[in-house]
Amino acid sequence: MKVAVGLSGGVDSSVAALLLRRAGHEVVGVTMTLGRAGEAESLAEARAVADRLGIPFHVFDFASEWKRCVCDYVRTTY
């Protein structure tokens, strides 16, 4: 079974990916960017986890959606 794991670079998502891989699943690491400060470090950590586990890693850029659906909404309704 192919499984996508949201990798943050932290312990929980890293162990989840490892356990799924050991259980025989085809694991793919995914994460999203929101255009926030400090993202580069956590993105690098997530990529390092994927590299160490030998799994593909994909980054999805949701910065414009985050700004439009969350930031702008909060700003106009607050």
Image (cartoon, rainbow, N blue to C red):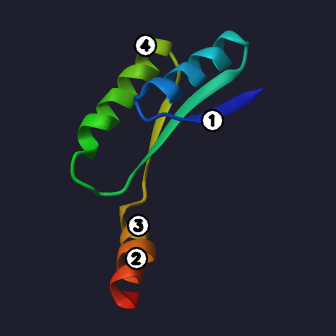
SS of the residue at dot 3?
helix
Q: Secondary structure at mark 4?
A: helix
The reply to whether dot 3 and dot 2 touch (C-beta < 8 Å) is yes
Three-letter amino acid code at disc 2? Answer: Arg
Amino acid carrying mark 3 in the image: Trp
Q: How far apart in space, not on screen, are marks 4 and 2 (Cα)?
A: 35 Å
Do residues under tags 4 and 2 come within 8 Å of each other at their CB atoms? no
**Image position, residue 62 (x, y; %):** 42, 59
Q: Residue 24 location in percent, x, y?
A: 73, 13
Badge 4 or badge 1: first in the primary sequence: 1
Q: Of label 4 and label 2, which has the lower sequence position?
A: 4
Residue hosting label 1: 4
Return the residue found at the far bottom. Answer: 76
* Residue type marked 4: Arg
Q: Neighbour class for label 4 at 10 Å: few (<14), some, many (≥20)?
A: few
> Residue 68, which numbered label?
2
Tell me if residue 74 comes above or below residue 12 in the rendering.
Answer: below
Residue at the (41%, 89%) spot, across then down: 77
Residue at x-position 45% and y-position 75%: 69
Give the amino acid type for the residue marked by disc 1 in the picture.
Ala
Q: Residue tagged by mark 4?
A: 52
Image mark for residue 66:
3
Image position of 38 with respect to 34: above or below:
above
For the residues marked 3 and 4, what is the alpha-carbon distance in whole angstroms?
Answer: 30 Å
Q: Residue furthest top?
A: 22
